[in-house]
Image (cartoon, helix red, strand yellow):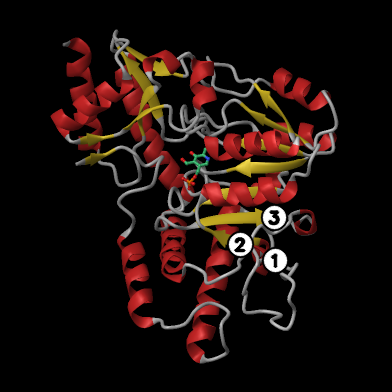
Amino acid sequence: MIYFDNAATTFPKPQSVYLASDRWMREQPAAFGRGLHSAAVSAAQMVDICRSSICSLLGLDSPRQLAFTLNGTDSLNLILRGLLCPGDRVVASTLDHNSVLRPLNELSHRHGVSIELAKFDPLTGLIDVDSFRTCLNRGRTQLVVINHASNVTGVIQPVAELAQLARDAGALVLLDAAQTAGHIPMDVMSLGVDLLAAPGHKGLMGPLGTGILWIKQGIEPQVVSLRAGGTGSASESLMQPESMPSKFESGNLNLPGIAGLLAGVQWIQDVTPSEICRQINRHAGKLRTHLGELSNVLLYPQGCLPETTDTVSTVGIVSFSLNGLESHDVAMILEQQAGLICRAGLHCAPLAHEGLGTTQLGGTVRLSPGHFTTEAEVDRAIEVIGDLARS
Ligand SMILES: Cc1ncc(COP(=O)(O)O)c(C=O)c1O
């Protein structure tokens, strides 16, 4: 198998991740925050170290402001549904994933939340700043959602610039870092965002079933907790704690998952995010260059982005269509002929495909190499796609 679907979930994980989750299940009996015995204390220590490690990796302050969730979708839902009130206005974009668009649409239909979607330029994949500004100026906006990097094109957005416009308009800023956390060097505090949602199982290298939610200090009172229950703290009260992170961590935490996530984050710190980013982008760059030379292949976005040695403009995602063929047919042939696993279709981002003009083709074929992808695998992918394009 040649795995090119790291944008869905990274595979393989570093060995230390498998070992940490396995060891946790075999050797650690306690649940987080339940009791003061030594096993519970060691669980609390591991969870605290994981919070601090993630914050230091992503440039987030106050590890206590970071809560563990089920995945990126869970984090986004907790914020969107917990923050937006009937009549509120939110600005997002047509690049957003269904994990943003579906909760927003439900909030719109059931609670009268109004949604404005900024457009993007299909040639560059960048959010159109004029369209974004127009959406902001149409009325008082409570929240802006920024897709850090599209899971269809891989293009990284100018978050600091967009967040500044949002703040000037008095809105809070939520960053969907699903495709960037762990994949590129990040200093989130310098971007000026208020809330961050990300999976633990993609770039952060943790197991499936892990996610993170970070809320800037002082903003948590504005977000209602959608879940309530045991937190192991303030048990005398019948009310859900208001303090972070307990407010969003009702019920037992996924400790084997968090132990694996901690090992993943420590692995990233050892290798360094810039090296991971450099390596994945080298593979993606080679794929783009070679596929772009095939006359039957169209790459998305279709224009070029300026790439310099110290800034990256894309994460390791390469989306293409082949000869007008249906994307699922192409993916099926690639798997049958070369054992190449990739993702075809709309990638849960239907409006991004509308914007790119790829809906009629059933979306695009997406290749997303990872840190453990080898040069030989990239060459094999180029070979088999080239053969298909020429046949
Ligand atoms: C941009 C984006 N946002 C959110 C998500 C949802 O993340 P999860 O699969 O962890 O729920 C994804 C997943 O692919 C994504 O690509």
Q: Dot 3: few (<14), some (14–19), or many (≥20) neighbours within 10 Å?
A: many
- The numbered dot on residue 67 is 2
> CB under 8 Å between callouts 1 and 2?
yes
Q: Quadrant of the C terminus?
A: top left
Q: Residue at x 52, y 29 (%)?
A: 155
Q: Nearer the viewer, residue 63 or 84?
A: 84
Please, what secondary structure does the residue beneath circle 1 have? loop
Q: Which mark is residue 296?
A: none
Marks 2 and 3 sit apart, C-alpha to C-alpha, by: 8 Å
Q: Looking at the rendering, in which quadrant would you find the N terminus?
A: top left
Amino acid type, callout 3: Ile
Residue 289 position by quadrant: top left
Q: Three-letter amino acid code at disc 1?
A: Met
Relative to 99, say whether 217 is above or below. below
Q: Is residue 17 left or right of residue 232?
A: left
Mark 2 neighbour class, 10 Å CA radius: few under 14, some 14 to 19, many 20 or more: many
Is the C-beta separation of discs 1 and 3 under 8 Å? Answer: yes
Q: Residue at x 60, y 47 (%)?
A: 76
Disc 1 residue crowd, few under 14, some 14–19, many 20+, Cα 10 Å: many
**Residue 272, x across and y down, in percent:** 46, 53
What amino acid type is highlighted by mark number 2?
Ala
Q: Which residue position is annotated with label 3?
A: 215
Quarter location, residue 358: top left
